[in-house]
Image (spheres, helix red, strand yellow):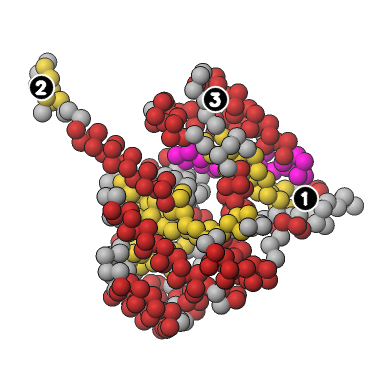
Amino acid sequence: MAEQAAGGHSVSQGLKVSALCRVTNFETARRVLGKNELHRVAEALAVRIAEGSHACEVIGVGRDLIEFSLRADDREAVTATLESLHAALDVQQRAFLGETRLEFAVGAACAPCDETDLLRLLEAAEIALARAGDERGLEIIDLSVADQAVDRLTLIADLPRAIAAGEMFLHYQPKINVRQQRVSSAEALIRWQHPERGLVMPGDFIAAAEESGQIGALTLWTLRQVISDQRRMAARGHDLPLFLNISGMLLANADFVDEVCEIITANPSAKLGFEITETAVIRDPESAIRHLQQFADHGVVLAIDDYGAGLSSLAYLKQLPAKELKIDKMFITQLTSSHRDPLIVRSTIDLAHALEMEVTAEGVETPAALALLSVMGCDLVQGYLISRPVPFAALCTYLDEQDQLAETMTNRPVFLRSGSSWTRA
């Protein structure tokens, strides 16, 4: 009989681990090394991670982030493997950079292989990475341990105070226009810094808010904060739309819809987008479509989120006043290694274009996936290859850098060849 671990799980099952390694001094290193050299080093470090354990697999290499997964027999093995990798990365980067030092933070989450919800595991890894901070730290969240479980009743009781006390805050993940190679918008993602629990995973407190009927208040707080951030961003010269997620439970709530429309009317210059899941519409299609049309009439851009993850219905899709369709990351992460996923993605892009919608691919984590999506005609991409979710100030810095790069490229002299000589255009 297999030995039982803490929480009642069999050690012989093994643990699945999702891990994120972030270069915490990325901006400094980029200025010193240059973008191309830093990317080359990042790819070499990713190879080192993959070689560090036979059970380790690199999922993607982003701007300042490497995502990987591994398997281990128990928590001790997880810790030992990640500590070894952390030390190996430090040694490896010295071989490439000499006196220029990269600094790393690693966040990971583990759970029994047969009970693993991959989305929840990745969310937990993101929380662990945030807890690791900007120091050369390592943080691991073990979802199989009982004392890591979130007490939903406690969260429900804490939510009103948390909103009033300013414990909620937003991170933003940019979307890149593939043809223009520029940020076209960004998605707002809510976070909760609990005074006792630290960062709470959105998958836990969003569900608690929906269960307790507080999702409306939480969404209205998010809307007002997004409007404020969008105004500040426009003042800095980046007048881009900001998107926020709307729970399906709220699409049938006429009072909520009316209050949202009042807020938007009071802020006519705000550029806003709402992301809604297809399953949210299927719950109550008549009222959902009617209320979505109200949002569209108020100038809100509507995006269908996680398309393909639920029951995709063409009957409802053609009725929605949506301008954007987001393909779920489950189809994107295996895009270059699957035979069927490229067919599904390509047909979805063609369908959306026929319905006069732009297409966003979520979860873009590799240059190969980006190249293939570009060939397929995908309009927008979002994922760790571009940027992880970042605070508002970091988003503005990212946009400033893009503008500087575009100006550099615009002002660069162009030379034309005539015979054996070159003349400046």
- Compared with 26, 302 (above or below) is below
Q: Position of residue 147 (x, y in %)?
A: 75, 57
Residue 364 visible in image: no
The residue positioned 50% from the left and 69% from the top of the image is 218
Gap between marks 1 and 2, in whole Å? 68 Å
Which is in the foreground here, disc 3 or disc 1?
3
The furthest residue to the right: 1
Give the mark nearer the N terminus: 2 vs 3.
3
Residue at the disc numbered 2: 423
Q: Amino acid at mark 1?
A: Gln
Gap between marks 3 and 1, in whole Å? 35 Å
**Which segment did they paint magenta?**
54-78
Disc ID at residue 13: 1
Disc ID at residue 93: 3
Give the mark nearer the N terminus: 1 vs 2.
1
The residue positioned 31% from the left and 46% from the top of the image is 182
